[in-house]
Each structure stands twice: as C-alpha cells, then as structure tokens.
C-alpha cells in the first residue's frame, strides 16, 4: 500500500497563517506606537485566537505521526499555551483576580459554551449524537474529582479552618497532588486518548504537512503567542477601565474564550462532521488539563518566579458555577447520547453565568 503524499498548506491553513501574521504585526505596531488601548486589546485578542488555531493545526499534523492517543493529549496540552502565557504575564502584572476567573472561565467555556455549540451544530445536522459513554464517564468523573481537590483550599478559607492562614502553602501542596494525579492519568490517556483528528470510521487521513513544516509553525506560533500575550495583558487593564469591565468578567469570558480558541473551533468542526465522540473528547480534555495541569502549574510558577502569589482560593460564586457545570456535563454525557436541545440548554446557562459576572 502506498502512502499518500504530503500536500502542504491548504487555503484554510493559509488564511489562518496570513491572518495570524497580520494580527501580530498590527498588535505590535499598536503596542509600540501606543495606539488606543481598546484597539490594541482587540488586535491582541484576535492575534491570540488565530495563533491558538495555528498551534492546534500544527499539533494535528504532528499527532497523526504519534498516534491517536498522543494526539488528544498534545492538542489539549499545547492548545493551552496561549492561555498559559496570558496567565503568567497577568500574574506578573498583579492581575490575580483575572487569572483566577480565567481558570474557572476556561472550564465553564468548554463544558457549557463549546460543548453546547458542538451539540447544537452536530444535533441539527446529524440528529441524536452518540458518545462513547464509557470514556465519557471516566473523563467526567476525573474532571469532578479534580475540581473537588482543586477547591478544597477555598472551602478551608470559607469555613475558617486552621488551614486558612496557610492558604499559600496549602495551595502549593494541592497543586503538587494534582500534577501527580495527572502523571498517573497520562499513560491511560495516551493509550485510550482522543482520536480527535480521525474520522469515526477509523480510517484517518494521512498528514498533509511535512514534518519540518509542522514543527516550524508550532515553534513560531508558540514564540509569537508569548509576545502577543504580553501585549494583550499590557492593554487589558486600561481597556477594562475604558470599557467598564470587571476583573471577574474579563477573566471569566474574554481571556477564557480567547485562550480556548482551539477547542472552540476544533470541537465544533468535529461535531459538524458527525464525529461526536472525538468532539466530546477534545472539548472535555481541555478543562481536565486546566484543573490537573494549568491551574497547579500557575500556582507553583507564581511562587518560583516571585509573581503575585496565586492560590486555589476562589470565590463562592465561581466555585458553585464550576461544580454545577461539571455535574451538568456528567448528567448529559452519562447516557451516551446528546441532542441539539441539550446543547441549547448548556449555551443558555453559560450566557446567564457570564451575565451574572458582568458587574463583578
């Protein structure tokens, strides 16, 4: 059997690459020429979104060579790079509340908004969608367990236990536990992980990009994402003041949605193609890695580099919304089916939660 030749970039790839490059240039000019902060912020948000999409496409091409299990892990892990950079620069700027809200917002955006839109698009186009109920139960159960562990410092703070004065040290210990839990989960994830880029008939398309091109674009987009994230955060606070946006809403909605562009695009595209199982895997992997990796990693990095200290103490409203979202996602996915009406309900709940945080 002959292997299909590698074809390189298609029109969609070129559009993302060209649009991302233009957005980065405009953001750089706006930043160094000290343009209006709102314009700089908008250019930076667009650049982050397009660079996140480019990271996702590069990982897809690499994942085809590493196998389906590694693809899902790579896509979720590297897909969170822009959000990691934004959070680091935000902590450096002292925007701790924005980072806390962004972490919860990323989980909510994936479990409610993106999953809801995927169910709507897939349901309207293909009817009732089948999910791998066994894999769904494992993923959502681990998500719930991770959220419980992540929010125990908040509970200790609210009820004023003896651990309350030591919330920084307690958060570091919890972060290490979460990272160890991820390492224990990783082998199973690599073996049975998401086949996010393969059709459900099991006959995936061969990589279109040469290996050197995938690696080059991945490295380039990661480097550019670091610069753009710095510019994004620099313009964020002045833009928030100019637009009268609260820290909570900025983190929960704006930063979270911009940083999760990969899952937004890929998950919905997969659902549109009738690949509901893989769409669910891609979407659910992202909040799982945020709880197991991104949040604890940021807690530790804030201590190592001397940034504004980040702890795992969240407001009662943020925590309650996160728990309700995970429970709702579990309730919907445990029967192994989804439809467009369930997707509409998830999206509606996200809109209501986002509105609740508009005032702070």
Image (cartoon, rainbow, N blue to C red):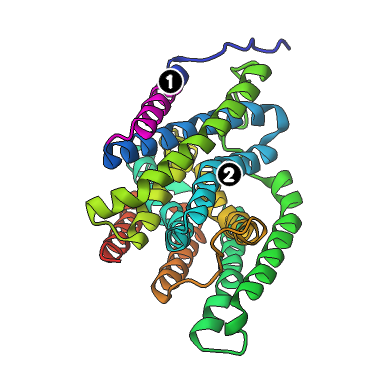
Left of 24 or right of it: where is 140? right
Q: Main secondary structure of the magenta part?
A: helix
Quadrant where the image shows the C terminus: bottom left
Q: Residue 321: x, y in percent?
A: 40, 68
Q: Residue 99: x, y in percent?
A: 47, 58
Q: Residue 115: x, y in percent?
A: 42, 50
Name the image quarter holding residue 163.
bottom right
Mark 2 vs 1: CB contact within 8 A: no
Q: Magenta stretch containing residue 18, yes or no?
A: yes
Which one is nearer the viewer's eye here, 321 or 212? 212
Which one is nearer the viewer's eye here, 331 or 161? 161
Q: What span is in magenta?
A: 16-35
Left of 51 or right of it: where is 253? left
Residue 136 seen: no
Instruction: Identify whether 231 is placed above or below 170.
Output: above
Local secondary structure at mark 1: helix
Residue identified by numbered label 1: 12
Residue at the (35%, 57%) spot, across then down: 346
Instruction: Identify whether 312 is placed above or below 204.
Output: below
Residue at the (61%, 73%) spot, across then down: 168
The residue most toward the front is: 33
Residue at the (65%, 28%) spot, across then down: 62
Q: CA distance from mark 2 to mark 1?
A: 21 Å
Name which of mark 2 and mark 1 comes first in the sequence: 1
State the mark number for residue 76. 2
Crowding near pointer 2: few (<14 within 10 Å), some, many (20+)? many
């Amino acid at each position: 059997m002959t292997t299909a030749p590698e074809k390189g970039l298609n029109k969609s790839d070129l559009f993302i690459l060209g649009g991302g490059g233009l957005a980065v240039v405009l953001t750089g000019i706006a930043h160094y020429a000290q343009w209006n902060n709102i314009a700089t912020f908008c250019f930076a948000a667009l650049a982050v979104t397009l660079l996140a999409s480019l990271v996702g496409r590069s990982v897809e091409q690499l994942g085809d060579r590493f196998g389906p299990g590694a693809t899902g892990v790579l896509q979720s892990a590297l897909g969170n790079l822009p959000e990691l950079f934004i959070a680091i620069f935000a902590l450096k700027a002292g925007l701790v509340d924005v980072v806390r809200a962004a972490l919860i917002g990323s989980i909510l955006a994936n479990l409610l908004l993106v999953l809801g839109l995927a169910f709507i698009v897939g349901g309207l186009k293909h009817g009732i969608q089948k999910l791998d109920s066994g894999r769904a139960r494992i993923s959502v159960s681990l998500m719930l367990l991770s959220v419980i562990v992540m929010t125990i410092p908040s509970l200790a703070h609210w009820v004023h236990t003896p651990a309350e004065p030591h919330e920084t040290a307690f958060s570091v210990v919890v972060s290490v536990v979460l990272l160890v839990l991820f390492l224990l989960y990783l082998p199973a994830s690599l073996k049975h992980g998401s086949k996010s880029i393969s059709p459900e008939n099991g006959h995936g398309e061969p990589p279109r990009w040469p290996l050197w091109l995938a690696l080059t674009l991945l490295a380039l987009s990661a480097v550019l994402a670091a610069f753009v994230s710095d510019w994004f955060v620099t313009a964020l606070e002045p833009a928030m003041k100019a637009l009268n946006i609260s820290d909570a809403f900025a983190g929960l909605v704006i930063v979270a949605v911009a940083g999760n562009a990969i899952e937004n695009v890929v998950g919905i595209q997969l659902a549109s193609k009738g690949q509901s199982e893989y769409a669910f895997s891609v979407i659910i992997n992202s909040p799982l890695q945020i709880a197991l990796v991104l949040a604890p990693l940021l807690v530790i990095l804030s201590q190592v580099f001397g940034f504004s200290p980040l702890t795992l103490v969240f407001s009662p409203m943020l925590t309650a919304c996160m728990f309700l979202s995970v429970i709702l996602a579990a309730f919907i996915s445990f029967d192994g089916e989804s439809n467009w009406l369930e997707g509409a309900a998830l999206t509606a709940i996200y809109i209501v939660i986002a509105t609740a945080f508009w005032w702070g």
